[in-house]
Image (tube, grey):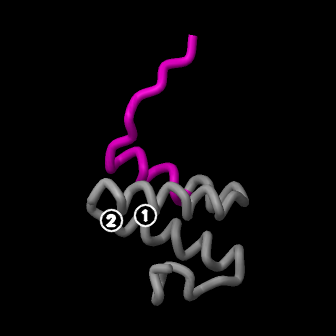
Amino acid sequence: MILICPLDESTYAMLIPLYAKLGEPDQSFKLFDEMIGKNFEIDPRTLNGLVIACDMTGDTHRYLFNSA
């Protein structure tokens, strides 16, 4: 049986850098968009994961400067 529960701020903060480090930067971006959509606070761990994801894609402006 698989249980699915809503993600909270801590879970997002853990998953975003994890996906980035596993070579899945697009999943990190998707989770970040969800997190922003839920008006969750962004902590340093989340931002670090986003920087890693941007670096992996070579798209450093994607979220860090333009947010689009």
For residue 1, side relative to residue 45 (left or right)? right
Query: Who's the residue at 59% across and 72% down the image?
Result: 52
In the image, residue 51 above or below residue 5: below
For residue 41, side relative to residue 16 (left or right)? left
Residue at disc 2, secondary structure? loop
Q: Residues within 10 Å of mark 2 (few under 14, many from 20)?
A: few
Q: Residues within 10 Å of mark 1 (few under 14, many from 20)?
A: many
Residue 20 falls in image quadrant: bottom right
Residue type at the position of mark 2:
Asp
Residue at disc 1, secondary structure? helix
Query: Who's the residue at 48% across and 71% down the image?
Result: 48
Image: magenta residue range? 1-17
The disc placed on residue 46 is: 1
For residue 53, side relative to residue 49 (left or right)? right
In the image, residue 22 above or below residue 3: below
Query: Who's the residue at 32% across and 65% down the image?
Result: 42
Q: Which residue is mark 2?
A: 43
Residue type at the position of mark 1:
Thr
Query: Who's the residue at 70% across and 83% down the image?
Result: 58
